[in-house]
Every structure is written in structure tokens, then in C-alpha cells.
Amino acid sequence: SEQFQDLEDVYSLYLTLFIPSGRPNYKKFNQVNNARSKFIKDWERLKKEIEKPHQYPGINQFIDKIYHFIHFNQYSFPGKMDYSHEKRIKNKIDEQWNSVNRYIVISIRSFENNRPTEAEYERKTHVSILVKKIRTNLSELQKNYGKRSKNKSKEILFYANSTYRIIPYFLIALISLLIIVALIFSNRITKPLSSMKDAIDQVAVQDYNINIKNKPNDEIGELSIAFEQLAERLKDSEKYKTSMLSQFTHEMKDPIGATIQAVRLLLKSPELTKQQSRFLKIIKNNSERLRKLINNILHSATYDKETIKLNYKRIDIVSVLKKVIISLALNAKEKNINVVYFSVPDKIDCEIDEDKMEEVFQNLISNSIKFSKEGSTIKIALKSSGVSTVEFAIQDQGIGIPLKEIPYIFEKMYRASNSKKISVKGTGLGLYITSHIIRAHGGQISAKSVENRGTVFKVKLPRNKKIAEVGGWFDA
């Protein structure tokens, strides 16, 4: 995480060199050089960590030899890691950084002589490409560190379980003693391992608030502490990324709005040719799309802080749903998709935030249309469950979601792996925003899916604000 930050500092400071100025800015040059030095220093330190021996010394090696001796070398942990992959990643980063470093040094010399040329802008392009590759390789290295921890936990658990195979080889008189020893040993191992497994699962869904309990005073305890520190760094990195993204999109919002307003005024001009009108409409549509993307990013940054403000009012939720279906009718017609809708009853009064709920319906229905096959059918149902709840369901016949990925589809910027095959554009924020809006209303959302057959999303909501604030009623 620290290396990521160093890279971003070098790259952002390097870009400032291209801001026009009347004379050489030696302060900027010094800042770039200092950032380069810090990256190099931290990278050398990180490489030493990578190149350390990957075997745990002491008692674990001794126990490993005993297992092999007792089992006549028949059993061996099948998931041994190949650490050569880390070495290859390290070598790639070395090569890419050396090129970036060389380009930056040349650029600084050129700007010191106040002779920026076209070659500098070509180098800038090369640096951007190389920085992107370094980011990718650092991410891969970060994932590999996570695999180390998980693999070590699995290895220890594997050997703990294998101890039960040796019990039949001992004398009957010692069976009771062996059972006691095995239970004590197993209990000591599995408790911290269970906590480690829960922590790993927690990080897998991007929850970095890790507090591992039952840390023993041994290698597993050290591993637990190291994992907590890693999660804390990931959390800081995520906060920094979200903050930067939010600031960037916020700055873009005003110029995009001004562009859209200017295009609308131009479209009203009677002197436009057909071609000019068509080009302006293209600009307007893409600007609107960009503004929606910016709004989604800003919303997601707000939802990260769990500060969703709802404007409750009593409305007919059926009319809200119908309005969204009508607005998306052309999208469905383009793919010849048949939309089947029904509600029971025809009118359902609810105390909700109308705009937010319209956004929920918009996200779920537009997703179903985007990922459905041409000529297929989408079924939409809305029904009242007594006086306290309302249920919404949407079923499509689209590409579906891989079963193992369903727990992650409501995470920020997550897109199912098979969505890339059909080139559907998206940011991975729609379901993330949808789930936060529903939870803010005191509701629940769930998904079931079969690949290449379709997906069903179900939403349950309380019908009034008081029930939403009390919470917990879905568990009854």
C-alpha cells in the first residue's frame, strides 16, 4: 500500500512538470527527485521482504518431519505455494520502474534547459503506460501476499487434521491419552485459524475493520498481527482512493453541467444544419452519460460513510415502478425484450424516498435489460405482504451470474466475470448504490442466478418509516 502511494506521488508530481511556466521551476524538480528517491528506497526494502526465505523455522518444521515419518511420506500438503511468481513480478516492476525513472530524469533535464519538445510528450505517454503496468503488478503482488497467509493457515489446518490418521497405530492402552492430546492440540490450532479464516473472508468482501481474536503467542499470532496491519493499510489505501476519486468527480461536475447547458442552448438555434444538430445531440447524450457516472461515483463516496439522507413521504410505490418501466420501454424494444409486469394490489401506499426508490428500480430493470438476450422475457412483480411490508421481484433470462461471485455483486465497483464477454458498459456501482438505498430504508435485497439461464433479484421493504427505524423485523 505504501509503494502504491509512492508511485502515485511520483506520477502526479511528474505530470506537474508539463504545466506551462515562464522559467524552470527548480522546486518542482526537487519534489520529483525526492519522490523518486522515496519510491526507490521503499521498493528496495520491499524487495528484501520478498526475497526472504519462505519457510517458518522452529517447531513447525520439526512437526512437519514427524508427520512425514509417521505416515511413511504418503501424505503431504497439496497446496504448497510457488514463490517464483513473486520473483517474476518483482523483476517486471524493476524493468518498468527503470524505464520510468530514466524518462523522468531526461524530462527534468529538458525542462531545466527550458527546451520541452514533442519527444517529452511522447515520453509522457510511455510513462503513463508503464505506471499503469506497475500498478497492475503491485496489485498482483499484494494479492500474492494475501495468498501466503491463507495458504499457511490451510497448511497448518491440513496437518492438524492429518494427526487423526495416526491414532489407530497406537496401543489401546494409550488411546485415551492420545485423544486428550489430540483434542488439546486441535483446539489450540483451530481457534486462531477460525479467526484467521473469518478475517480473510471479511477482507475478501472489502471490509477492512479486522480484529482477530484468540491470537496465540506463536507464529500464528505473529501472522494474525501482520494480517491486521495489512488490513489497516488496505483500509487507508481505500480511503485515499475514495477521497481522490470523490474530489476529482466533484471538480468535473460543474464543467460537465455547463457543457450540457450550452449544448441545449445551441440545439434551439434555427440555423443548425442536420449534421451539426446530430453532432450536438451526440455531445449532449455522452455528456449526460458522463454526468450520471459522476453522480454515481459521488453517491457511492457518500454511501461509504453510511450517511444516506432519506426524504420520506407517503406515495404509491406502484406508480413509481410504472414510471420507470415506461422510461425504459425503448431500451427493451431495441432488443425485442418482452416485459411482463403485475402488482397486487394495483395501488400500494408506502412511506419512502421517491427519488431513491426510483433509482433502485432504474438500476435493477436497466441491468436486466442490458444482460438479457434478444427476444427474451423479463418478469416484474410488486406485491403487498400484509400491512407492514412490500416485496419486489425481477426475473430475467440473461447471462446469469457465476454462483461463487453472487456474495460480491453488491460490493463497490464489482462486475461479474462473465459480463466482460458481452461488452456491456458499466462501472459496477449500480448494485452497490441499490443495496445501500434499500438497507437505508430498513429493507433487504437478495439474488439467485444460474449461468446462461437468468437471474432473480428480490427486494423486501417496510411500508413505513417507523418500522424501518426499528429494524430487525425480517429476521422474525
Image (cartoon, helix red, strand yellow):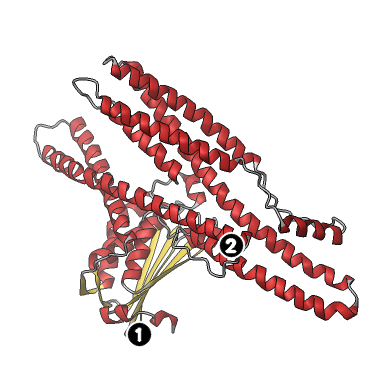
Q: What residue do we see at 76% from left, 74% from top?
A: 181
Which numbered disc flags the more N-terminal residue, 2 or 1? 2
Mark 2 Cα-neighbour bin, 10 Å: few <14, some 14–19, many ≥20: some
Instruction: Give residue 386's mark.
Output: 1
User: Where residue 401 sits: x, y (%)?
Assistant: 51, 57
What's under tag 2, amino acid-wise?
Gly
Indicate whether 6 appears above or below 144.
Answer: above
**Along the viewing direction, whichever of 389 and 342 lies nearer the viewer:** 389
Residue under numbered circle 2 = 221
Q: What residue do we see at 54% from left, 43% from top?
A: 141
Q: What residue do we see at 29% from left, 61% from top?
A: 359
Q: Secondary structure at mark 2?
A: helix
User: Where residue 433 sits: x, y (%)?
Assistant: 34, 60
Indicate whether 456 appears above or below 175.
Answer: above
Left or right of residue 459, residue 67 in this image: right
Mark 1 Cα-neighbour bin, 10 Å: few <14, some 14–19, many ≥20: few
